[in-house]
Image: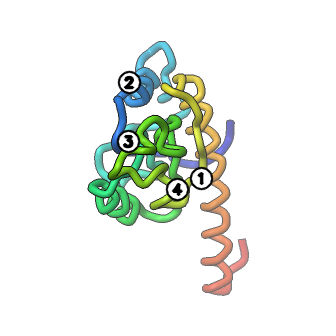
Amino acid sequence: MNYIKKSPWILHYDGSSCNGCDIEVLACLTPLYDVERFGIINTGNPKHADILLITGSVNEQNIPVVKQLYEQMAEPKVVVAIGICATSGGIFAECYNVVGGVDKVLPVDVYVPGCAARPEAIIDGVVKGLGILEQKQKEMRKKESGRYGTAN
């Protein structure tokens, strides 16, 4: 796996959920699944994060929080929606304050299905996100080299 030059940092945010997917995200950090073998580091600061993992549905009260976290992340960035609640609202979709999945508020790059999503599926989604992150980095470099007249 030769995706990117630096270790990607992930930021995990839990929207309105039952916490099942959150437990599975934490399981990815244990020695059994060891997501850090891909060089992934978990951070609590959106300014350091490359990948935003979101579990749970989006409701009226957490829309500003989700948008603010996303806007604080440096470009390029990737959003991974984990679990059926993050992808479509799940069992909470019919609640009065739930607007649905994360894609109602942010552009989502990778969808990880499941209720709760399995650690293997989460890791697979993050690895796919790494590929998308590399692609976005290349596109960004290409735009910058065109803007400044340098060839790479």
Q: From this view, report whether residue 136 is shown above or below residue 6.
A: below
| Disc nearer the start of the sequence (1/4) | 4
| Disc nearer the start of the sequence (4/3) | 3
Can you tell which mark lies on residue 12? 3
Mark 4–mark 3 Cα distance, whole angstroms, equals 16 Å
Mark 1–mark 4 Cα distance, whole angstroms, equals 9 Å
| Disc nearer the start of the sequence (2/1) | 2
In this rendered view, identify the residue nearer to me: 59 or 147.
Answer: 59
Q: Which residue is mark 2?
A: 23
The type of residue carrying mark 3 is His
Marks 4, 3: nearer the viewer: 4
The type of residue carrying mark 1 is Asp
* Helix, strand or loop under label 2: helix
* Helix, strand or loop under label 3: strand
Q: Position of residue 86 (x, y in %)?
A: 48, 43
Give neighbour class at mark 1: few <14, some 14-19, many 20+ (Cα, 10 Å): some
Mark 3–mark 2 Cα distance, whole angstroms, equals 12 Å
| Disc nearer the start of the sequence (3/1) | 3
**Residue extending furthest toward the top:** 32
Q: Name the residue at 54% across, 60% down.
A: 107
Q: Which residue is mark 1?
A: 109
- 67 relative position to 151: left or right: left
Q: Which residue is mark 4?
A: 103
The type of residue carrying mark 2 is Ile
Mark 4–mark 2 Cα distance, whole angstroms, equals 22 Å
Q: Quadrant of the C terminus?
A: bottom right
- 120 relative position to 74: left or right: right
* Helix, strand or loop under label 4: helix
| Disc nearer the start of the sequence (4/2) | 2
Q: Position of residue 42 (x, y in %)?
A: 38, 38
In this rendered view, identify the residue nearer to me: 95 or 118.
Answer: 95
